[in-house]
Amino acid sequence: MPERTSYDAVIVGGGHNGLVAAAYLARAGHSVLVLERLDHTGGAAVSTRAFTGVDARLSRYSYLVSLLPPKIVRDLGLRFAVRKRTVSSYTPTVRDGRPTGLLVGKGEAHTRTAFAELTGSEREFTAWQSFYGATRRLAERVFPTLTEPLPTREALRAVIGDDALWHALFERPLGELVEETFADDLIRGVVLTDGLIGTFAGAHDPSLRQNRCFLYHVIGGGTGDWDVPIGGMGALTDALADAARRAGAEIVTDCEVTGIATDGRTAEVSCAAGTVGARRVLVNAAPRELARLLGEAPPPPAEGAQLKVNMLLTRLPRLRDTRVDPREAFSGTFHIAEGYRQLEDAYRQAASGALPAAPPSEIYCHSLTDPSILGADLVRQGYQTLTLFGLHTPARLFAADTADHAPTRDRLLAATLAELDTHLAEPLADCLAYDAEGRPCIEARSPLDLDRELGLPGGNIFHRDLAFPYADPEDGHGGGAPARWGVATTHPTVLLCGAGAVRGGGVSGIPGHNAAMAVLEEGAGKS
């Protein structure tokens, strides 16, 4: 039960963004209440013992960190750390009937040699270096703006200071840039994947959804690096909850919010424990959920497009490409069926209503970089985790099974693992561990599962389509601090602090930070 009947700020949802907002506001002296529907905080950024009787804490939903600004870690005094991966990616393929692949990492010289062995020349590596040199410069300039008031489109363009790069990434479909820059189909596909994580779009989609997704995947931390959270994703949200509580925020779990009412000056939040007054309500939930709580018409449908699979293995499988150690291949992002043509074929098949014949996916082994997520006995025995993220599997493919979408999910899982097996020297099934009840240690989540479990609309991990990180004068939210920070709704007392805010998406804490800054800038009173 909440301790009071009224607060300066009530935060709906105890995911990582809500906890960031709570910690900032409480540190500024505001009375803060966080209400969480589940029996734990963390939202999609949690660690879970997913398999009965097995001492392995897996990052069940979100699993890597890129967009979390060091500023938030410093400001809130978080006891949290990440570790860099020595290998960026490995992409297996078959050339001239021979298993081979591309290993990116282990230093520039090694990567240069890997490109030359795959393609037969220096051209693609030179193009790669130039391309990612440009995205790194972009990251250095854009990332710091994410925790500042929203720039205008022209102001952000001036910050970037490269009209050709601006035109390529902000005004033309990503596929055009990829095709102009690279000739090799496999390398084109590796680049395109960053535009498709959780985003259902083709390379030439005129909406530029793929461009916006790509942008957020290459600017993280000002470097574009994707890091492994030490202790699993739950270590971050546990640290955030601790920081919020230390600052004086009150967190109530097992308390579902059922409605929000506002007269434009103050608000009331109805929940399982009763009604609580608030000067400001910060909603760490999707815009669809906000509309439901306000009793308003829902926004246009959002749709996720991913399959998330967690596994525990007794050992890593051997590869058909015998030049590569499995410990290297799986310590970065392991790309499956992600050649450029394969990705486009999978998109077209899914858009027509069919499961992709060769489902594309990405895999990585958290425990190679951070064995702390496994119990000591499992580490001694050589056990490893695998996390798989499947692409181009939109919610509509599962919704056709009106009674139970499990058969579709199971067919997709089988096809995805079969595609992985084509690059292994032994079936993955031979390497799976078993839980205390004799079941294989593998679990899969479809977009509909994510909607049911986490309230993600259509399983959309970004809550809605990502937006470019500049102010849109046509957003209909007027002026004021919330609009300046990209967290406004149509109600002055209600702010978005989740992934559906401008500059939301990913595990970043940025919307939570920005919503708190908007409240502080407004100078809303403290009780």
Image (cartoon, rainbow, N blue to C red):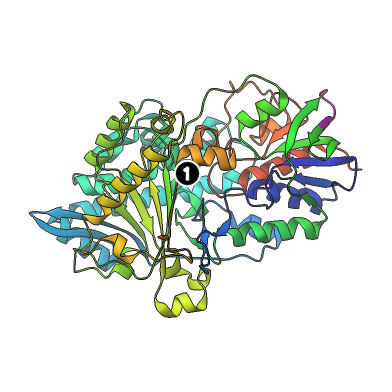
Q: Could you tell me which residue is drawn at 30 percent across and 37 percent down?
A: 177
- Which quarter of the figure has residue 145? top right
SS majority, magenta: loop
| Residue at far bottom of view | 380
**Would residue 48 appear left or right of 189 to someone viewing this image?**
right
- Which quarter of the figure has residue 524? top right
**Would residue 37 appear left or right of 524 to someone viewing this image?**
left
Using the image as rendered, state which of residue 171 and residue 260 is in the foreground: 260
Residue 267 is covered by the magenta coloring:
yes
Specify the amino acid type for callout 1: Tyr
Q: What secondary structure is found at the residue carrying circle 1?
A: helix
Q: Position of residue 422 (x, y in %)?
A: 21, 54
Using the image as rendered, state which of residue 443 and residue 66 is in the foreground: 443
Using the image as rendered, state which of residue 126 and residue 211 is in the foreground: 211
Magenta segment boundaries in residue numbering = 263-268
Q: Position of residue 258 (x, y in %)?
A: 74, 32
Q: Could you tell me which residue is drawn at 48 percent across and 72 percent down?
A: 371
